[in-house]
Amino acid sequence: MSSSKNISEEELIRNAQRSTAGFSVLYNLYHNRIFLFILKRVEDEDTAADITSDVFVKIFANIKKFRYKGFSIASWIFRIAINEMNTFFKIRKRTRVISIEQTHISNILSDMNEEESSTFNCADNDLANALASLKDEALTIIELRFFEQLPFKQISEILSITETNAKVKVYRILKTLKSNLEHGK
Protein backbone atom coordinates (compact mmCIF):
# COMPACT_ATOMS: atom_id res chain seq x y z
CA MET A 1 0.00 0.00 0.00
CA SER A 2 1.33 3.45 -0.88
CA SER A 3 1.78 6.17 1.71
CA SER A 4 -1.34 8.01 2.80
CA LYS A 5 -0.07 11.22 1.15
CA ASN A 6 -0.07 9.60 -2.29
CA ILE A 7 -3.45 7.93 -1.98
CA SER A 8 -6.72 9.36 -3.27
CA GLU A 9 -9.54 9.88 -0.84
CA GLU A 10 -11.63 7.27 -2.66
CA GLU A 11 -8.84 4.73 -2.32
CA LEU A 12 -8.34 5.64 1.34
CA ILE A 13 -12.04 4.97 1.98
CA ARG A 14 -12.04 1.69 0.02
CA ASN A 15 -8.98 0.50 1.95
CA ALA A 16 -10.59 1.47 5.27
CA GLN A 17 -13.70 -0.47 4.27
CA ARG A 18 -11.70 -3.58 3.29
CA SER A 19 -9.33 -4.07 6.21
CA THR A 20 -8.31 -2.97 9.67
CA ALA A 21 -4.91 -2.01 8.25
CA GLY A 22 -6.67 0.30 5.80
CA PHE A 23 -8.80 1.69 8.61
CA SER A 24 -5.69 2.37 10.68
CA VAL A 25 -4.41 4.68 7.92
CA LEU A 26 -7.67 6.64 8.10
CA TYR A 27 -7.49 6.62 11.90
CA ASN A 28 -3.89 7.91 11.89
CA LEU A 29 -4.80 10.69 9.46
CA TYR A 30 -7.71 12.04 11.50
CA HIS A 31 -7.32 10.96 15.12
CA ASN A 32 -5.18 13.85 16.37
CA ARG A 33 -7.22 16.48 14.50
CA ILE A 34 -10.50 15.17 15.94
CA PHE A 35 -9.01 14.81 19.43
CA LEU A 36 -7.87 18.46 19.38
CA PHE A 37 -11.23 19.57 17.97
CA ILE A 38 -13.01 17.87 20.88
CA LEU A 39 -10.42 18.91 23.50
CA LYS A 40 -11.01 22.59 22.69
CA ARG A 41 -14.65 22.12 23.61
CA VAL A 42 -14.38 19.96 26.73
CA GLU A 43 -10.98 21.12 28.10
CA ASP A 44 -10.32 17.77 29.73
CA GLU A 45 -7.91 15.33 28.07
CA ASP A 46 -9.52 12.18 29.51
CA THR A 47 -12.99 13.26 28.41
CA ALA A 48 -11.69 14.29 25.00
CA ALA A 49 -9.96 10.90 24.65
CA ASP A 50 -13.18 9.08 25.60
CA ILE A 51 -15.30 11.04 23.13
CA THR A 52 -12.67 10.64 20.40
CA SER A 53 -12.66 6.90 21.06
CA ASP A 54 -16.46 6.85 20.70
CA VAL A 55 -16.16 8.77 17.43
CA PHE A 56 -13.73 6.25 15.93
CA VAL A 57 -15.76 3.27 17.18
CA LYS A 58 -18.75 4.74 15.29
CA ILE A 59 -16.62 5.36 12.22
CA PHE A 60 -15.27 1.79 12.32
CA ALA A 61 -18.78 0.35 12.77
CA ASN A 62 -20.19 2.39 9.87
CA ILE A 63 -17.30 2.77 7.42
CA LYS A 64 -18.65 0.00 5.18
CA LYS A 65 -21.87 2.00 4.73
CA PHE A 66 -20.02 5.17 3.72
CA ARG A 67 -20.36 5.91 0.02
CA TYR A 68 -17.98 8.38 -1.56
CA LYS A 69 -20.08 10.98 -3.40
CA GLY A 70 -17.49 13.70 -3.79
CA PHE A 71 -17.82 14.83 -0.16
CA SER A 72 -14.71 14.66 1.96
CA ILE A 73 -14.58 11.86 4.51
CA ALA A 74 -13.32 14.53 6.92
CA SER A 75 -16.77 16.15 6.75
CA TRP A 76 -18.40 12.85 7.72
CA ILE A 77 -15.89 12.38 10.56
CA PHE A 78 -16.46 15.92 11.88
CA ARG A 79 -20.24 15.36 11.76
CA ILE A 80 -19.84 12.23 13.89
CA ALA A 81 -17.56 14.12 16.30
CA ILE A 82 -20.09 16.96 16.66
CA ASN A 83 -22.90 14.47 17.28
CA GLU A 84 -20.85 12.62 19.91
CA MET A 85 -20.01 15.89 21.68
CA ASN A 86 -23.65 16.96 21.63
CA THR A 87 -24.62 13.59 23.13
CA PHE A 88 -21.96 14.01 25.81
CA PHE A 89 -23.19 17.49 26.73
CA LYS A 90 -26.83 16.35 26.89
CA ILE A 91 -26.12 13.25 28.99
CA ARG A 92 -23.72 14.95 31.38
CA LYS A 93 -25.64 18.22 31.41
CA ARG A 94 -22.34 20.04 31.09
CA THR A 95 -21.85 23.31 29.34
CA ARG A 96 -19.49 23.38 26.45
CA VAL A 97 -16.26 25.31 26.65
CA ILE A 98 -15.23 27.98 24.19
CA SER A 99 -11.47 28.04 23.82
CA ILE A 100 -10.49 31.14 21.86
CA GLU A 101 -6.99 31.93 20.68
CA GLN A 102 -5.94 35.43 19.71
CA THR A 103 -5.85 34.43 16.02
CA HIS A 104 -9.50 33.34 16.27
CA ILE A 105 -10.45 36.73 17.70
CA SER A 106 -8.55 38.51 14.94
CA ASN A 107 -10.22 36.40 12.25
CA ILE A 108 -13.70 36.99 13.64
CA LEU A 109 -13.14 40.75 14.00
CA SER A 110 -11.63 40.90 10.53
CA ASP A 111 -14.72 39.26 9.01
CA MET A 112 -17.02 41.54 11.06
CA ASN A 113 -15.22 44.56 9.59
CA GLU A 114 -15.05 43.21 6.04
CA GLU A 115 -18.41 44.60 4.96
CA GLU A 116 -18.04 48.08 6.45
CA SER A 117 -15.56 50.92 6.12
CA SER A 118 -15.45 51.53 9.88
CA THR A 119 -13.36 49.31 12.11
CA PHE A 120 -15.13 47.44 14.87
CA ASN A 121 -13.18 46.38 17.92
CA CYS A 122 -14.04 44.89 21.29
CA ALA A 123 -12.39 43.39 24.34
CA ASP A 124 -11.50 39.71 24.07
CA ASN A 125 -13.64 38.76 27.07
CA ASP A 126 -16.62 40.64 25.58
CA LEU A 127 -16.32 38.58 22.39
CA ALA A 128 -15.95 35.38 24.44
CA ASN A 129 -19.12 36.25 26.38
CA ALA A 130 -20.98 37.06 23.16
CA LEU A 131 -19.90 33.72 21.67
CA ALA A 132 -20.99 31.90 24.82
CA SER A 133 -24.47 33.35 24.43
CA LEU A 134 -24.91 31.79 20.97
CA LYS A 135 -27.09 28.74 20.46
CA ASP A 136 -25.21 25.48 19.93
CA GLU A 137 -25.70 25.38 16.14
CA ALA A 138 -24.50 28.96 15.69
CA LEU A 139 -21.50 28.37 17.93
CA THR A 140 -20.61 25.20 16.03
CA ILE A 141 -20.68 27.11 12.74
CA ILE A 142 -18.40 29.84 14.15
CA GLU A 143 -16.03 27.21 15.58
CA LEU A 144 -15.83 25.34 12.28
CA ARG A 145 -15.22 28.51 10.28
CA PHE A 146 -12.90 30.47 12.55
CA PHE A 147 -11.38 28.00 15.00
CA GLU A 148 -10.95 25.03 12.65
CA GLN A 149 -10.57 27.37 9.64
CA LEU A 150 -12.65 25.15 7.41
CA PRO A 151 -13.82 26.37 4.01
CA PHE A 152 -17.53 27.00 3.49
CA LYS A 153 -17.75 23.95 1.23
CA GLN A 154 -16.61 21.63 4.01
CA ILE A 155 -18.84 23.35 6.59
CA SER A 156 -21.79 22.81 4.27
CA GLU A 157 -20.90 19.10 3.97
CA ILE A 158 -20.57 18.69 7.75
CA LEU A 159 -23.90 20.40 8.44
CA SER A 160 -25.72 18.97 5.39
CA ILE A 161 -26.61 22.42 4.05
CA THR A 162 -25.70 24.23 0.84
CA GLU A 163 -22.46 26.17 0.62
CA THR A 164 -24.45 29.38 0.09
CA ASN A 165 -26.50 28.64 3.21
CA ALA A 166 -23.27 28.09 5.20
CA LYS A 167 -21.99 31.51 4.06
CA VAL A 168 -25.28 33.21 4.87
CA LYS A 169 -25.40 31.61 8.32
CA VAL A 170 -21.83 32.69 9.14
CA TYR A 171 -22.44 36.29 8.13
CA ARG A 172 -25.80 36.46 9.93
CA ILE A 173 -24.16 35.12 13.10
CA LEU A 174 -21.36 37.68 12.76
CA LYS A 175 -23.92 40.44 12.29
CA THR A 176 -25.77 39.29 15.43
CA LEU A 177 -22.52 39.11 17.40
CA LYS A 178 -21.53 42.60 16.29
CA SER A 179 -24.95 43.99 17.15
CA ASN A 180 -24.88 42.35 20.58
CA LEU A 181 -21.39 43.68 21.25
CA GLU A 182 -22.30 47.23 20.14
CA HIS A 183 -25.36 47.24 22.39
CA GLY A 184 -23.65 45.57 25.34
CA LYS A 185 -25.79 42.43 25.37
Image: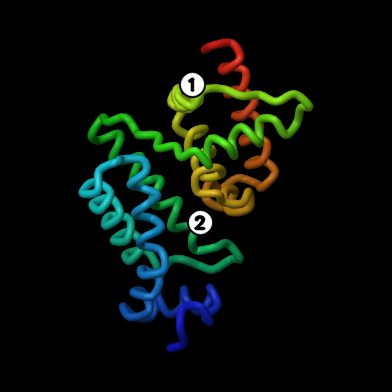
Residue named by callout 2: 75
Residue highlighted by disc 1: 126
Between 70 and 185, the one lying in front of the other is 185
Query: Where 105 falls versus 126 (above or below)?
Result: below
Marks 1 and 2: CB-CB under 8 Å?
Answer: no
Residue farthest to the right? Answer: 117
Q: Which residue sits at x=35%, y=47%? A: 38
**Whether residue 10 is situated above or below residue 3 in the rendered picture:** above
Q: Residues within 10 Å of mark 2 (few under 14, many from 20)?
A: some
Q: Amino acid at mark 1?
A: Asp
Q: Which residue sits at x=31%, y=29%?
A: 95
Where's residue 72, x and y in %?
54, 63
**97 relative position to 147: left or right:** left
Instruction: Indicate the position of residue 82 as horizontal and vertical percent values.
Output: 41, 46
**Residue at (25%, 53%) from the top-left corner?**
49
Residue 82: mark in rendering: none
Which residue is outermost to the bottom? 1
Residue 47 location, x and y as percent? Answer: 23, 46
* 133 sits left or right of 156 in the view: left
Q: Secondary structure at mark 1?
A: helix
- Amino acid of disc 2: Ser
The N terminus lies in quadrant:
bottom left
- In screen coordinates, is 50 left or right of 31? left
